[in-house]
Amino acid sequence: MKIVKYKPEYQKQFEQLNKSWVEKYFKIEPMDETILYNPDEFIIKNGGKIFFVEYQSKIIGTVALIYVSDGVFELAKMAVNESFQGLGAGKLLCKTAIDEAKKMKATKLILFTNSKLKPAISIYHKLGFKNVQLDGQEYKRADTKMELVITNKWFDRDFNFDFGIEQYDNLLDRLENFPMILNQKLDQIPEQFPTYNTEGKWSINQNIGHLFLLEIIWRARFQEINDGKKMMSPADLNNTATTRSSFNKLSITELTKCFWYERIKTIDFLKSLNSDDILKSSIHPRLNQPMRVIDLMYFVAEHDQHHMNTILEIMNNKFFTKYEKGNTIR
């Protein structure tokens, strides 16, 4: 089996593969017809992708990544020819779509399915998808929503700082509200879980402790930009302080309070700046590019989200499942 990318001449296979399974269990809906008849317009041109599995010179399966919003894609239109099911084509298609989503810097994949499609749901679960509250579905047949939080390596991220000062209020809100949002997620954690780690990765406690340590560095860099310093102070890229810390000996409540306290001080500093101050810049030592105060605000907000995604990934792993008693973290 091999993966091939979408070409306009594959539209008929895309349509037939999907119609075959939908008509077996359900009815074709208007949204099916819109997308299946014109995938170029409704998927490809909107920033999505379509893949096929080729086996013995025959297209036997397909899957699509549909753009939803920045960082979010829908895994959709997965279908495998019934005569070739059992070869692993569905899993190969899903893994290909997930890998492509990572390349496109996606932070989350969502999908809608039906509870009677047990083989497909089994594949999704094995690949890390978790059931979440059903909303936003466009198909009557969809009674199940799932999502996969994607954690990309922070140092692999590219940043484009081409936005204007009009983003200041939105970014300030993201920074100010993040500790509260984090707390809401952490309220769902069993008492014994915050120090759990696997494969040498940080625990939830260590991720929160890292946010606390970095907050002090962020605020120092905001001050350096405002003071007109040419280059910001470097950070320890090995994160030695976090790795060697005693964060796992502290309670999650203590750690979140420390982080929140430091974030409040950062917010107070940012609120003291005027519109000219927000556009001042210094060179970021790792990225080696000028960064305005407003750019650093975005950088910090994305760093927050990166560690939120990491924490959610830990919360959703198999180890955590046995403590959930059937409740899915969202």
Image (cartoon, rainbow, N blue to C red):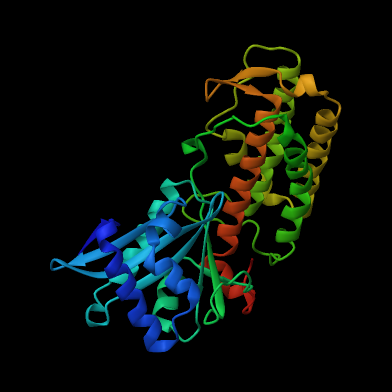
* Whether residue 61 is visible: no
Q: Residue at x 36, y 61 (%)?
A: 95
Vertical position of residue 59 compared to residue 142: above or below: above
Q: Residue at x 55, y 21 (%)?
A: 289
Q: Position of residue 136 (x, y in %)?
A: 62, 69
Q: Residue at x 58, y 40 (%)?
A: 243
Vertical position of residue 158 compared to residue 249: above or below: above
Residue at far left of view: 56
Q: Residue at x 40, y 54 (%)?
A: 44
| Image side of residue 228 versus residue 68, left or right | right
Q: Position of residue 75 (x, y in %)?
A: 45, 64
Vertical position of residue 237 compared to residue 259: above or below: above
| Image side of residue 73 versus residue 203, left or right | left
Q: Toward which corner of the image does residue 195 lie, by quadrant?
A: bottom right
Q: Quadrant of the N terminus?
A: bottom left
Q: Quadrant of the C terminus?
A: bottom right
Q: Nearer the viewer, residue 314 or 25?
A: 25
Q: Toward which corner of the image does residue 48 lie, by quadrant?
A: bottom left
Vertical position of residue 288 compared to residue 175: above or below: above
Q: Nearer the viewer, residue 150 or 110?
A: 110
Q: Number of numbered discs present?
A: 0
Q: Toward which corner of the image does residue 194 lie, by quadrant?
A: bottom right
Q: Position of residue 4 (x, y in %)?
A: 25, 57
* Whether residue 281 is visible: yes
| Image side of residue 90 versus residue 136, left or right | left
Q: Position of residue 230 (x, y in %)?
A: 64, 11
